[in-house]
Amino acid sequence: MTAPLTPTKVPLTDHPCFDEAARSRTARVHLPVAPRCNVACNYCNRKFDCVAESRPGVSSTVLTPEQAADYVDTVRREVPHLAVVGIAGPGDPFANADATLRSLRLVKQRHPDLLLCVSSNGLGVPGHLDEIAGLQISHVTITMSTVDPGVAARIYRWVRDADRRVYRGREAGELIIARQLEAIRGLKERGVTVKVNTVLVPEVTLDGVADVARTVAALGVDTMNAMPLYPVEGTPFGELGAPSTDQVARARSDAGQHLPQMTHCQRCRADAVGMLDDDHDQTDVDRLMAARVNRGHARPHIAVCSQEGFLVNQHLGGADVVYIYENADVDGRITPRLIDTRTTPPEGGGAGRWATLAGTLSDCRALICHQLGGSPRTVLQSAGISVYESDGLISEAVTDVFAGRTPRRALPPRDCATSCSGPGTGCG
């Protein structure tokens, strides 16, 4: 059901992340529709489903664009003073550009008065500048923590461009900084309000914050959020510790000579909802999870792991992509047809990796792979995705599953822990 529209356009100043005065009068909702990421930051671990944890990259589930639009309808009925609909992950919105833009397009159709925003690392933004302007996305945040490629090489383990090429070291730093500057320039040329988030990492980015502020101010950036590192266990920067209060104050003071500073950031989850100061609780999780169930959308597709797209011959943990098939149903016969390939989440993160994959495959009734471990099996099955191991032709395996049969397996299954160098949990 579509919620009734409010006839008066929400003022641009009612975005609580861009105007501190708005934090006490307006609410926002983040739509977790973007599970994939195109960079690996040394401070990020995209752990899923910890209700009490509030930080970027965390979400209890992933929604399809249609589910997200229904979810906004519900939020608008139940959460007072909603002014902003944003997308901030749990990966990067423009590593999932189709889902991001479709979600916001659906929201715009139903609620044209609400503000739309996205938060991105900037790598994929330049290729979508006109679409951003066309959708009237009024606020964009770019996370840019340095203008020095050498420092960027310390922040990012890798950067993966749209052509799937992976960059590392200084080359990665040069690429992402160039894209971030291109994104900011293009957004400002199109009249978008832009905020830059700069992560204050002791021994890494603290000394260069003013340089970032000076550089982006020259491009017309509106405000800056110099945000302290949130040390996350298990990440390369997890042992550094957060910057001290004095270090944060000094960094903001130096940057403040060039740009207005945001000082009320709550480091929101990718599925945050309500006022900035509201606690994220079980009620919020239940509302979000209901959005996945209530639409009752069909799962018409099947996902397959394959090295070359012909045989089912790849372990789930080693698959960079999965192949998506539908039943074309020619003359009443099951006819598998390849319709998509989707990137799997990067290694690391344990069960969170498989929760992300479950969101990516939310339209799939089953996944067929050569082998997988216990952790991904449990997570995928709990998300309603049947899991099969096979070693035959993709066409035959997919046909079997569409027909309600278990696909063939000629070779006996092996213990995951002894068949590869991984820990036996699916190479999480």
Image: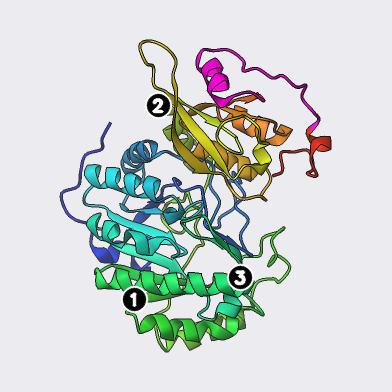
Disc number placed over residue 297 in the picture, else none: 2
Q: What amino acid type should be assigned to the residue bearing mark 1? A: Asp
Q: Nearer the viewer, residue 357 or 58?
A: 357
Q: Nearer the viewer, residue 420 or 188?
A: 420
Specify which label sits upstream in the sequence, 2 or 1: 1
Q: Is residue 217 left or right of residue 192?
A: right
Q: What amino acid type should be assigned to the residue bearing mark 2? A: His
- Where does residue 169 sit, x and y in percent of width and height? 62, 71
Q: Nearer the viewer, mark 3 or mark 1?
A: 3
Residue in the picture at 62% in, 49% down: 47
- Where does residue 104 sit, x and y in percent of width and height? 32, 48
Q: Circle 3: is it few (<14), some (14-19), or many (20+) Cα within 10 Å?
A: many
Could you say which quadrant of the image residue 66 lies in? top left
State the SS at label 2: loop
Specify which label sits upstream in the sequence, 3 or 1: 3
Disc number placed over residue 222 in the picture, else none: 1
Residue in the picture at 25% in, 38% down: 3
Region rendered in magenta: 391-415
Would you place residue 167 above or below residue 397 in this image? Answer: below
Distance between the alpha carbons at the discs numbered 2 and 3: 40 Å
Residue assigned mark 3: 155
Specify which label sits upstream in the sequence, 2 or 3: 3
